[in-house]
Image (cartoon, rainbow, N blue to C red):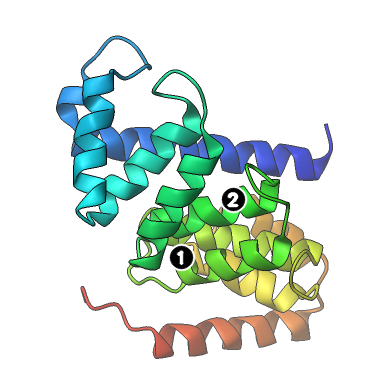
């Protein structure tokens, strides 16, 4: 398998695991079932909340449709509910919508739209869930030049902003850079952090 294939697979598994963990805490009655398939009652409960504009319910409903938790995958419904949640500012939905565009899942593959939604997720502070994933995914697009110009300094910055110095993608970006380019990327990172203060601190 290619490096890109491994990275895409790792991102998909990471996103799915994050969704499952968050869902278990958000909807314990649903997550206590022994099956990964959800009932029609589960779907109706999420739909009722989603239709009332609950961004979190919209995101989980979309995830359930995308993953086939109601029996089979339904990408048009996943796309619809991810978009509604993402437009309300849910970072997890913004990242997931970016992944659908990057992978051409239920839509024509469009790296530019993937970058747009990843950036929206990446701009969230603090770095939780979809924000960190959006930063990593946006960094990957900069690393490969998909939907954005290839820019190792931007890739490096977004990988640093994931908050994980052990991010293997950071090493890949660093391997393409001179010491001067790394210093420039670190300056970009420091400037981004100054412009996006963490309200929790």
In the foreground, 152 or 147: 147
- Tell me what residue is drawn at x 42 percent, y 54 percent: 93
Q: Quadrant of residue 55?
A: bottom left
Please give the count of numbered marks on the rendered protein: 2
The x, y position of residue 105, in whole percent, is 64, 42
* Residue 143 is at least partly visible in this image: yes
Left or right: 71 with respect to 35? right
Which one is nearer the viewer's eye here, 108 or 134?
Answer: 108
Which residue does the numbered mark 2 point to in the structure image?
Answer: 99
Q: The residue tagged with tag 2: helix, strand or loop?
A: helix
Which image quarter holds the C terminus?
bottom left
Dot 2 crowding, Cα within 10 Å, few <14, some 14–19, many 20+: many
- 64 displayed left or right of 100: left
Placement of 159 over or under 80, stated as above or below: below
In the displayed structure, 107 sits above or below 182; it is above
Q: Is residue 19 above or below residue 180?
A: above
As measured in the structure, the alpha-carbon distance from the residue carrying label 2 to the one carrying label 1 is 11 Å
Q: Residue furthest top?
A: 34
Question: Label 1: which residue?
Answer: 121
Point 46% across, 65% down: residue: 121
Q: Is residue 161 left or right of residue 100?
A: left
Identify the residue at image location x=74%, y=68%: 147
Residue 100 point in image, percent of width and height: 60, 48
Mark 1, Cα crowd under 10 Å, few <14 / some 14-19 / many 20+, is many
Is any part of residue 167 visible from this angle?
Answer: no
> Earlier along the polypeptide chain: callout 2 or callout 1?
2
């Amino acid at each position: 398998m290619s490096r890109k294939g491994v990275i895409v697979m790792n991102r998909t598994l990471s996103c799915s695991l994050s969704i499952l963990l968050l869902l278990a805490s958000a909807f314990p009655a649903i997550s206590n079932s022994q099956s990964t398939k959800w009932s029609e009652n589960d779907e109706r409960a999420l739909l009722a909340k989603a239709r009332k504009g609950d961004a979190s319910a919209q995101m989980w409903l979309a995830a359930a449709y995308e993953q086939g938790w109601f029996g089979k995958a339904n990408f048009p419904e996943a796309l619809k509910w991810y978009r509604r949640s993402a437009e309300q500012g849910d970072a997890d939905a913004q990242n997931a919508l970016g992944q659908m565009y990057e992978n051409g899942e239920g839509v024509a593959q469009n790296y530019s739209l993937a970058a747009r939604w990843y950036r929206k997720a990446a701009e969230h502070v603090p770095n939780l869930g979809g924000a960190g994933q959006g930063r990593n995914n946006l960094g990957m697009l900069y690393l490969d030049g998909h939907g954005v110009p290839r820019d190792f300094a931007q890739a490096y910055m977004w990988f640093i902003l994931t908050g994980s110095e052990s991010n293997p993608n950071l090493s890949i970006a660093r391997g393409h850079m001179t010491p001067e380019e790394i210093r420039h990327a670190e300056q970009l990172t420091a400037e981004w952090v100054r412009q996006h203060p963490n309200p929790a601190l």
